[in-house]
Image (cartoon, helix red, strand yellow):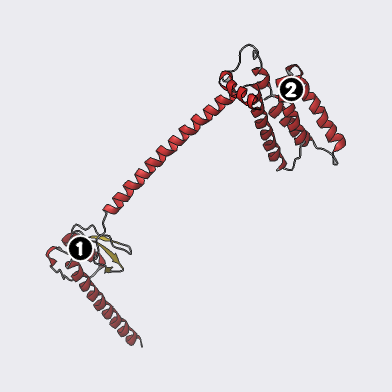
Amino acid sequence: QMEDACDLMLLQLEQDEKLNAKKSRKLSEKLGKLSKGGKSYPPEISSPREVREKAESVLKVQVLHGEKAIYSGEGVADVLLVDSKAESPHVPIDTSVEVVSTQNNEADLTCSKKAKKGRSVLFGATMGLAVAAWVYSGNYVFTGLFTLMTALGQLEYYRMVMNTGIYPARRISVLGACAMFVTALFAPNLHQICLPVFATYTMIWFLTMRRRTATIPEIATTFTGMFYLGYIPSFWVRIRLIGAGRQPTRLAPIVQPIFTRLSEIS
């Protein structure tokens, strides 16, 4: 039995050697046909390494490992070697398409950068003109827009606080901030009374009018919004009124005919 098994193993090895030799011969014949003039090189090659070396030395072939072949189209073939098998070239790839595509991508990127830069400059110039018009628009327009921005800022601040589970007296705070701006415009001498008045009103509401007991964070966030987003910004209106009776705003002569015309129509 051992002799029979050895004979079978020897027979299998001989068949494998013959099969490998046949595959190598076919491979060498295919590689030989790739050379200039269509000459065939059918040498006896027994291993894939010898096939690769023979291809690189005789045919100037670049042998690669992979699943697809890439050809330069100028007489030099790139042949794939996968499991002792090679593929012959069929259709050359036009590399000019990739070059044009790369150039188009670079051009698009350059144009997008220029367009973005132009939009940024235009946005900055527009915002500068809007702020300049707001500053020189007059006391009433300046105070009205500033009050609106302050109210929106307070509501946004209290909304973020409420997301954490803290519920301040936001209506009283927004009303107090608006009252501070209006008082700073029409009665600057009474401006500083607004903060203690609305602070007292807030504490009365927390202690007597609210159904549940107020917490320290709720009281603290209420006074924070009222002080930093109401009382302090209102001083811009009060500072603006310093020397306001001596010289009108720069835009007053321009808009005065428009207001006069509107008053005549009404």
The spot of residue 93 in percent (x, y) is: 26, 59
Q: Find numbered disc 2 in the image and state the secondary structure of the residue it sits on.
A: helix
Label 1 sits on what residue type? Ala
Label 2 sits on what residue type? Thr
Q: Where 5 sits versus 256, above or below?
A: below
Camera-side mark, 2 or 1:
2
Q: Where 43 sits versus 7, above or below?
A: above
Query: What residue would you read off at disc 2?
Result: 183
Q: Which quadrant of the view contains residue 15?
A: bottom left
Of the two numbered discs 2 and 1 on the same chain, state the one appearing first in sequence: 1
At x 75%, y 16%, the residue is 189
Query: What residue would you read off at disc 1?
Result: 55
Q: Nearer the viewer, residue 47 or 193?
A: 193
At x 70%, y 40%, the residue is 159
Residue furthest to the right? 208
Structural crowding at the residue carrying mark 2, measured as other residues with C-alpha within 10 Å and reported as few (<14), some (14–19) or many (≥20): many
At x 21%, y 58%, the residue is 73
Structural crowding at the residue carrying mark 1, measured as other residues with C-alpha within 10 Å and reported as few (<14), some (14–19) or many (≥20): many
Q: Nearer the viewer, residue 96 or 155?
A: 155
Question: Residue 22 has which mark?
Answer: none
Residue furthest to the top? 246
The spot of residue 52 in percent (x, y) is: 23, 63
